[in-house]
Amino acid sequence: MPLAKFIAALVGLLVVLSMIVRPAPNTREKIYFAAMKGDLRNLITAQEAFFSDSARYAISLQELGDSTRFWTTPGVTVSITEATDRLFRARARHSDLTPPGGCEIAAGFEKEMGDIPDNGEPICKPDRKRRSWIFVWEL
């Protein structure tokens, strides 16, 4: 009987500890954001290849076609939000991010960029509530 109580107490303690201590809650999110950034950087390469042939940026991923060899990471959705003969903007989302966050990128000729601070550099926004590193609290 004392052994059964000890085992029950040990299991209870492990359950409580598993609820309190969370191993690196942001690790997966960092991987998802890295995948989105990588896909957006690859989109720049594909758009530049398209631009060299067409003297304009593609307005959709379908227009880029297989000739540019642009594929996204599984779970990442990339959409071109604006494209002209001088610049393009795109957005990436990951299906496993909850709540959804995303990355955006803009690239083109410097004079056309205007309010965009980083030409060709992805800007990511987690779009989530702040969490502490040990206790998961929604603030």
Image: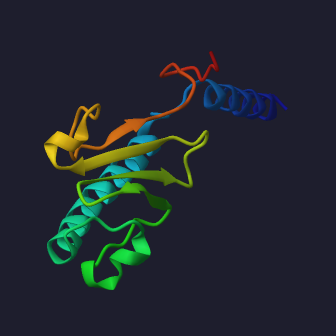
Q: Quadrant of the C terminus?
A: top right
Q: Nearer the viewer, residue 26 or 36?
A: 36
Q: Quadrant of residue 128?
A: top right
- Residue 29 on image: x %, y %: 45, 42
Number of marks present in the image shown: 0
Q: How is the image coloured?
A: rainbow
The furthest residue to the top: 139
Q: Nearer the viewer, residue 70 or 134?
A: 70
- Residue 31 lies, with reference to residue 18, above or below; the image says below
- Residue 2 lies, with reference to residue 71, above or below; the image says above
Q: Residue at x 57, y 42 (%)?
A: 100
The furthest residue to the right: 1
Q: Is residue 44 left or right of residue 100?
A: left
Q: Is residue 107 left or right of residue 63?
A: left
Q: Residue at x 25, y 56 (%)?
A: 41
- Residue 56 lies, with reference to residue 62, above or below; the image says above
Q: Nearer the viewer, residue 6 or 128?
A: 128
- Residue 42 lies, with reference to residue 88, above or below; the image says below
Q: Residue at x 32, y 50 (%)?
A: 37
- Residue 33 on image: x %, y %: 39, 45
Q: Quadrant of the N terminus?
A: top right
Q: Residue at x 15, y 42 (%)?
A: 110
- Residue 36 on image: x %, y %: 38, 52
Q: Quadrant of residue 43?
A: bottom left
Q: Nearer the viewer, residue 55 or 128?
A: 55
